[in-house]
């Protein structure tokens, strides 16, 4: 038994209507969603799970990511070698990743190999051997990965920002987990994570490309029908909302040639009414990179300041990026920027606060809003350029919000945003709200947190 939800249809000829995007729900709560792409002979099929690092137990942080590594080390039916050979002989590609809220396993394959691909996905997800020797061996691999990430300063700064903004909360934990916990994770931790989080109502099987929806539903029942539903209906945002803390962490390191700084305020969740408004506002603030050799003629006032506002008209930073990051029940919005170790960081901070004050004062133009809306619509469309990207869009939306906005619906929401919406958003999100700060490098010229917080009230 299954329940079919609304189907969107696309007219291919005057006489034929072909279903494009369709969803169904199995008895165990697992969602099956597909989007047919005419003219293709390949497909992307994958499983999106509403469980990532924030579902880790605080005492076994890093378990979700650890499981991703072990999934390809052999199952009850396939050894690691047999698994690798089978995938290679099919001509398929199988990948996986873990985020703070989701775990994803997906395959890009020929249309004729969809059944085999779904079989393998089910096998590695639900029948992984979790061999103790493989667990011990993989600890060294993950510790090496942790060492590599420690050299990626943008990742490090944003991990610190999350740890500060969501102090002692699940969103504040890193995806890989602390090194001391990685070293002691055991099979019981991994089994407990699977039995707790891998539930039908927390999973979606997505197929995009040369996919027949009814056949995909049959495969879902065949390979995932044994998975149980949560005893209590799962809702990621159903508990207490995360508490956003205005605080800072500064790591002084004068040996680093470049300083990395991230600032953030609480912003929109995936399903918040101001989700797209935050993205348009971020687009107006824009981004800039000194290496591109432009900026003085940028339509973004902050980009112009970054490019020319330093001593003797020199750049005051190396680069900056306005960002928005959303989760099921909260989000982050702010600026990440880099500067030379001898730069006066106060100059860029003052320019940023001035830019945010401009928004709150309503001193933005209709042209800025329309330009940012056009850029956002273009980026949304460009992000859906193949079956894997579309599967990612569908899977992320379904497991994080419970529904999927089509590109057309997203366009409509973006197009409806007005200058007044942006100003109202800024006065709500940026006026007298706590701000979090993470900085790494030579931070001696960075204003105090109290000064920045005071500047945000203007």
Image (cartoon, rainbow, N blue to C red):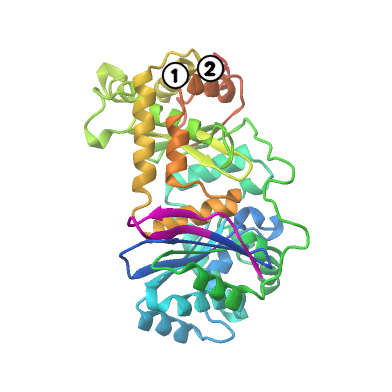
Q: Determine whether 141 is above or below 314 in the image.
A: below
Residue at image position (45%, 25%) is 445
Q: Which mark is residue 177?
A: none
Residue sitting nearer the eye, 104 or 191: 104
Q: Determine whether 197 is above or below 360 in the image.
A: below
Q: In the picture, residue 337 is in which quadrant? A: top left
Q: Determine whether 359 is above or below 29 in the image.
A: above
Residue at image position (36%, 45%) is 381
Q: In the picture, residue 308 is in which quadrant? A: top left
Q: Which mark is residue 455?
A: 2
Crowd around label 2: few <14 · some 14–19 · many ≥20 (10 Å)? some
Q: Which mark is residue 350?
A: 1
Residue at image position (46%, 87%) is 82
Whole-angstrom CA distance, mark 1 to mark 2, is 8 Å
Residue sitting nearer the eye, 426 or 258: 426
Whether residue 359 can be seen here:
yes
Circles 1 and 2, Cβ within 8 Å, touching? The answer is yes
Quadrant, the N terminus: bottom right
Q: Position of residue 243 (x, y in %)?
A: 69, 37
């Amino acid at each position: 038994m299954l329940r079919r939800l609304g189907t969107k249809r696309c007219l291919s000829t005057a006489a034929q209507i072909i279903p494009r995007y369709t969803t169904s729900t199995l008895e165990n709560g697992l969602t099956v969603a597909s989007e047919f792409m005419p003219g293709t002979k390949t497909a992307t099929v994958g499983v999106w799970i509403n469980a990532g690092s924030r579902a880790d137990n605080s005492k076994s942080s890093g378990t979700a990511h650890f499981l991703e590594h072990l999934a390809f080390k052999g199952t009850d039916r396939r050894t690691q070698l047999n698994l690798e050979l089978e995938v290679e002989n099919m001509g398929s590609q199988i990948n996986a990743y873990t985020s703070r809220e989701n775990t994803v396993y997906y395959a890009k394959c020929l249309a004729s190999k969809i059944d085999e691909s779904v079989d393998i996905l089910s096998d590695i997800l639900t029948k992984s051997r979790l061999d103790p020797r493989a667990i011990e061996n993989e600890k060294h691999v993950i510790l090496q990965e942790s060492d590599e990430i420690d050299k990626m300063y943008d990742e490090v700064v944003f991990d610190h920002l999350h740890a500060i903004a969501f102090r002692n909360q699940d969103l504040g934990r890193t995806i890989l987990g602390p090194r001391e916990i990685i070293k002691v994770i055991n099979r019981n931790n991994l089994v407990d994570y699977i039995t707790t989080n891998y539930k039908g109502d927390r999973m979606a099987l997505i197929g995009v490309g040369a996919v027949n929806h009814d056949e995909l539903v049959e495969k879902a029942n065949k390979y995932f029908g044994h998975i149980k539903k949560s005893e209590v209906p799962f809702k990621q945002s159903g508990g207490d909302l995360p508490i956003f803390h205005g605080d800072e962490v500064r790591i002084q390191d004068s040996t680093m040639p470049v300083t990395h700084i991230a600032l953030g305020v609480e912003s929109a969740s995936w399903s918040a009414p101001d989700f797209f408004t935050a993205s348009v506002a971020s687009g107006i603030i824009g981004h800039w990179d000194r290496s591109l050799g432009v900026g003085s003629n940028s339509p973004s006032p902050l980009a112009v300041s970054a490019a020319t506002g330093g001593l003797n008209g020199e750049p005051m930073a190396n680069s900056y990026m306005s960002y928005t990051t959303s989760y099921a029940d909260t989000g982050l919005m702010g600026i990440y920027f880099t500067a030379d170790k001898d730069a006066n960081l106060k100059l860029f901070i003052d320019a940023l606060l001035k830019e945010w004050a401009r928004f709150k004062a309503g001193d933005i133009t209709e042209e800025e809003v329309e330009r940012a809306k056009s850029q956002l619509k273009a980026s949304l469309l460009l992000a859906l350029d193949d079956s894997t990207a579309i599967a990612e869009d569908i899977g992320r939306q379904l497991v994080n919000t419970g529904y999927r906005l089509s590109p057309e619906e997203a366009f409509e929401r973006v197009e409806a945003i007005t200058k007044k919406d942006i100003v109202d958003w800024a006065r709500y999100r940026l006026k007298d709200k706590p701000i979090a700060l993470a900085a790494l490098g030579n931070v001696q010229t960075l204003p105090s947190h109290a000064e920045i917080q005071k500047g945000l009230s203007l």
